[in-house]
Image: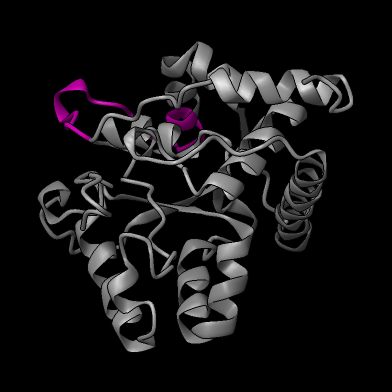
Amino acid sequence: MSVEGIITGHEERFDWPEFAGLAQPYILASVPRTGSTYLSHLLWRTGCLGAPLEYLNFQPSGPQGAVSTSPEGQIKLWKMVLARRTSPNGVFGVKAFPLQMEELARTNPALLASAMRFLLRAGPASKVVQLRRRDEDAHAISLARASLSGIWRAEQEAGPGEAPEYSEAVVLRARHELAIQEKAWQQMYRETGITPLVLWYEDVVENPDEAVAQTADYLGVTLDPAQQVDVPHIRQQDQTGANYWRARHADGGSID
């Protein structure tokens, strides 16, 4: 499904043939504005690491918004995803943020329980690839600007609208929100005994092939170049406004 003309990757034309066996699952764990969409598409492009998109995100404005108010529809869609988004070698990935899990716990606890039983069925041996950002200022600024502008992808930048006015308070709030979500993942690791593979946004951008290789090694998957697939291209958003905010933030918000 496309969102306002944007190719999201959820479209049927990107499906694999239905997988009938028991898939090897993993979670691509992250928080907003880490470059997780970029990483998910790098992994997906291999054709061997599943297609880890946000299959448990049913926001009305998102690609799965058609079932946003239908728990039964969400369960049906999840089962369809498990069959059609498992790569031919049996690997299934799902990208998730803590706030999405909290929302699903509130609106569809049966689906959340079923999904987590499947994703974490190996107990401490379950696989989680976590993507983080070292530059906390840039991370908070990115979330703050997106929250104010409603622009989350490069494809949205061509539309009308003024750049958001700098707000130190919104940046600080974004930093706090991100810290809470990061702590949620740490809590899950303590409770389950899982040791995740931690990747850093800055490293992924600098050496994407190495990030893919690390993920494959962690999952115990052999990559086969012949299995590569075409996936939507992910473009970086324009950084002009972010750089201005960064300068304002570094100067305590006093630059005009």
As drawn, is 198 to the left or to the right of 16? right
- Residue 130 percent across, percent down from the top left: 60, 41
Q: Residue furthest top?
A: 206
Residue appearing at x 14%, y 50% in the figure: 16
Q: Is residue 196 visible?
A: no
Colouring convention used in this rendered image of the protein: one colour
At a point 47% along the width and 22% down the height, the residue shown is 238
Give the total of numbered labels: 0
Bounds of the magenta segment? 215-231
- Front in this rendered view, residue 220 or 116: 116
Relative placement, left or right, of 117 versus 249 is left
Q: Could one spot residue 35 in this view of the protein?
A: yes
205 up-or-down from 181: above or below: above
Looking at the image, which residue is at 52% across and 66% down?
Answer: 121
Q: Position of residue 180 (x, y in %)?
A: 78, 54
**Quadrant housing the N terminus:** bottom left
Left-right relation of 34 to 187: left
Q: Residue reaching furthest front?
A: 256
Q: Nearer the viewer, residue 105 or 221?
A: 105
Q: Quadrant of residue 222?
A: top left
x and y percent of residue 8 in the render?
28, 47
